[in-house]
Amino acid sequence: MDIFGVVLILGICYWRNFQETIYKQGEIFFNTGDQFSELISQGGFPLGYFSMGAAVLSVLSGRFTAKQNNLGNIFGIIIAVTSGTLDYLFGNHSAIITYPITFLVASFATYKWSTGIKIRKIDTQYYIILSGALLLAFMLVHLGFYLFGGREGVVFRNSVALIFGLSLAGNISNAFKYRETWFNWMGYNILQLVKNTIQMNFANVVKYIFYMISAVITYFDWRLNGDVKKDRSGSNQIPA
C-alpha cells in the first residue's frame, strides 16, 4: 500500500500536469507548459512539485502511523510545516495560527509513542479531546482570517475550521493511541476532498482518496489485531 499510494499520487499528478503549477506574486498558475522555466526564472515558486513531494511524505507518514511505527509521527512534524505553507498559498491564511499547533501536537505524539503507549478504547477523555479541539479550531481559524485575510466565503472558512478541528482532535487522540482516531480521519478525509477539489490541488485530492481507504483498513486492523509486537531489534512484527 505504501508503494501504491506514492505511485498513485505521482501518476495522477503527472497525468494532470499538476507539476507545472506555479505560485507567483500571490497568484497560482496551472498548466504553465513552456512558460514554466520562464516563470521560475522570474521568481515563481514550483508549487506543483512542492505539493507532490509533501503529499508523498504525508502518505508515508499516514502509512507508518497505521503500522504503529513512530516514524509516522516524526514525518508528521515535517508535514506540519509543508502543509501549513501549502494551505497558506492556496488561500487559507489562518494557517499562520493553526499549523504551529499541529506542529506541537505532532511533537507531543512522537514523545508519547516513544514511551511505548498501547492502543486504547474510547472513553470520556476522547470526547473531551474531540469537543475541545473543534471549539478551539473554530475560534482560531476565524481569528486567523480576521487578522490575516485570505480567501473569502463563509462556507470555505467554516469548512477550514471544521477540517482543522477534526485534524487537531485526530492528532491529539493519535498521541494517546485511541483506535477511534481513525473515525476522525475518515471525516477529515471527506472534507479535505471537497476543499482540495475547490482549490484544484490535485495532489491532495488523490492523497485523500488513498487516505480514506487506508483509514478504513487501519481502523479494523487496530480493532481486530491490537498492538504490534516488537522483536529484539525493535522492528515491528505481526500484530498480536
Image: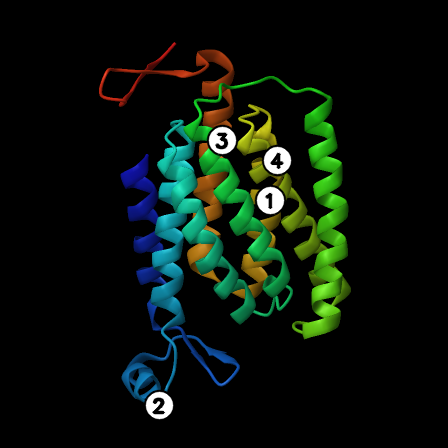
Identify the residue position indicated by label 1 in the image. Answer: 167
Question: Where's the N terminus, which quadrant?
Answer: top left
Identify the residue position indicated by label 2 in the image. Answer: 42
Front-most of 171 and 14?
A: 171
Identify the residue position indicated by label 3 in the image. Answer: 112
Identify the residue position indicated by label 4 in the image. Answer: 184
Q: Residue at x 44, y 33 (%)?
A: 214
Residue type marked 2: Gln
Q: How many marks?
A: 4
Residue 16: x, y in percent?
37, 63
What is the C-alpha distance between the residues marked 3 and 2? 45 Å
Chain-order first, disc 4 or disc 1: 1
Callout 4: few (<14), some (14-19), or many (20+) C-alpha neighbours within 10 Å?
many
Residue 178: x, y in percent?
57, 25
Judge left or right: residue 31 versus residue 158.
Answer: left
Residue type marked 4: Asn
Judge left or right: residue 143 versus residue 14.
Answer: right
Chain-order first, disc 4 or disc 2: 2
What is the C-alpha distance between the residues marked 3 and 1? 18 Å
Q: Residue at x 33, y 47 (%)?
A: 8
Residue 36: x, y in percent?
31, 81
Callout 2: few (<14), some (14-19), or many (20+) C-alpha neighbours within 10 Å?
few
Which of discs 3 and 2 lies nearer the camera? The answer is: 3
Mark carried by residue 234: none
Residue 125: x, y in percent?
70, 26
Residue type marked 3: Lys
Question: Where's the C terminus, which quadrant?
Answer: top left
Chain-order first, disc 3 or disc 2: 2
- SS of the residue under disc 2: loop
What is the C-alpha distance between the residues marked 4 and 3? 19 Å
Q: Residue at x 46, y 26 (%)?
A: 218
What is the C-alpha distance between the residues marked 4 and 2? 42 Å
